[in-house]
Image: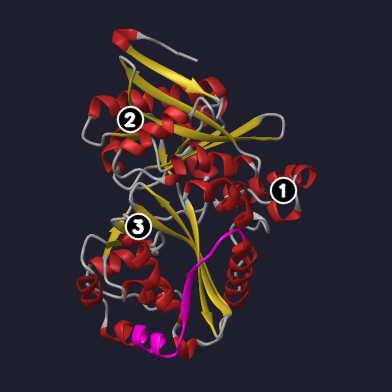
Amino acid sequence: MVLHTPDRIKSVVCHEHEEARIWDHFLNQCSDTHIEQTSTWGKVKELYGWKPVWVWVTRESKILGGAMILTRRVGRLATIGYVERGPVCDPGDHESMELVTKALCRVASSMGITYLVVVPPYCGEGGIPLLQSLHFRPKPDVLPPRGVGRATLLIDLRQDLDALLADMSMTKRQNLRRAVRKGVRVRVGDAADAEIVRELMWTACERRGISPSPPHKDIFENLWKVMGPTGGVKFFIAEVDGQPVAAACVQVFGGTMQLWRVGWSGTHDHCNPNDILHWEMMKWAKENGCHVFDFMHILPDHARAILRGERIEDSYSGVTDFKTSFGGRVRLLPEIYYRSFDPLTHSVLNLGAARIMESDLCVKMLNKAFIKVYNRNLSKSEVSWNSTFRL
C-alpha cells in the first residue's frame, strides 16, 4: 500500500512476508544492519503472537530506508509496537532519515499504537534528535521491554588470528591452551541440538537464579526451522568426552555474528569449555566471512566504567570480566525511546503525566492489568507486560 507520493517520494506499507522480500534485499545491501529487522526474524516473532508490518520510503523505486514494526493487540483497546534496531537508513543522509522516521510515525498513528518502543540501530545516534522532535521520550528502565542491550563488546575479526589472540588477556590465552590439552571439542550443531542448547541455557539460568528469556521451550527449535535454512542461526556445542557441557546460539547477518544466548552445565570448569567455545565461534565467523563478533550484552554501568578506565565490582562483574578478557571494543548504544500514538494517551503524556506512567506504582498496576489479559490468552510463562517483548 502506498501512503503518499510527493516529489517522487513514496511511502510503502507491507503486511505480507512475500512482499517483504524487497525489504530483505535492501537490508542485505546496507552496512551496519541488524537481523532483528529481517523478515525471517519477523517470522520467528509471529510464532509468539506478534504481527510484523513493514514501512519503507522510496525515491523513484529506490528504497531510502524503513523499518519493520512488530505489533501486538493487548485486550480490545490497546496495541503495542516494537521497532528493534531500526529505522534503517543511511546514517549520514539526514533527509532520508527524516522521511523514514516520519513515515514510521504515520503508520503508527494510523494503527493507533498505544505504546511504541524504538530501539535504534548501533549507528543510530544521529536519529535521536529527530525522535525527540517527534515527541518520543527516553524509555526509563521501569517500562518494558527490559533487558534490551544498551552496551556491547565488539571484536574486530578482520585481524589475523595472532592479533586476536594478542588482544586477549594472558589468562584467557592460558585457558584456551588448557582447553585444548584437556580435549574439549567444539562442534557446529544442527536441528537435533536445539534441545541441548535449551537445556544448557535453562540450567545456567537456574544456577544464577534468573528466569530463562525467552521462556518458550520451543524457541531454539523454531529459530532453526525459520532461520537455519538461510544460515541466519547457528548452534555451537562444547563437549568433554562426548558430553555437551556448554553451548551457544548465534545469529549471523550482514557480516556480524551476534552471541544471542549461551548455556553451561556448570561442570568441567577446569577444562575451560566456555573459553574455547567462544574462541571457536570467533574463528568460525572469521572463516565464513564475518568481520565482527558481537557479544551483545554488557551492562551500561559496566561499559561506562570501562570506558573511564575503571571497574565496577558487583554480582555481574564476573560475566563482564569473562567477555572483556577476549579483548575488543566496548561500545555504548543509543538510548531507547517510546511514544504513544493513541490520541488520548499522547495528550495526557504531553500534559505532564509521563512521570506518573513511568512510576513504579503505575508499572505495577499496568503489569497486573496485562496479566489478567494474558491469563485469558497466553500460557502462564508469558503473563507479564515485560514478557510480551521477550525474544
> Which amino acid lies under the numbered mark 2 shown in the image of this protein?
Ser
Location of mark 1 (residue): 371
Identify the secondary structure beneath mark 2. helix
CA separation in Å, label 1 and label 3: 44 Å
Task: Give x and y (percent) for residue 308.
Answer: 22, 68
In the figure, is residue 228 to the left or right of 178?
Answer: right
CA separation in Å, label 2 and label 1: 34 Å
Seen at 41% across and 85% down, the residue is: 179
Precedes in sequence: disc 2 or disc 1: 2
Q: Nearer the viewer, residue 145 or 290?
A: 290
Look at the numbered discs 2 and 3 and tell me whether their residues touch, using CB distance below 8 Å: no
Task: Give x and y (percent) for residue 102.
Answer: 38, 24
Q: Nearer the viewer, mark 2 or mark 3?
A: 3
Label 3: how many Cα within 10 Å (few below 14, some 14–19, many 20+): few
> Which amino acid lies under the numbered mark 1 shown in the image of this protein?
Ile
> Which amino acid lies under the numbered mark 3 shown in the image of this protein?
Asn
In the figure, is residue 305 to the left or right of 352?
Answer: left
Q: How is the image coloured?
A: secondary structure
Task: Give x and y (percent) for residue 194.
Answer: 61, 62
Location of mark 2 (residue): 133
Precedes in sequence: disc 2 or disc 3: 2
Location of mark 3 (residue): 288
Is residue 188 a member of the stretch shown in magenta? yes
Seen at 70% across and 44% down, the residue is: 369
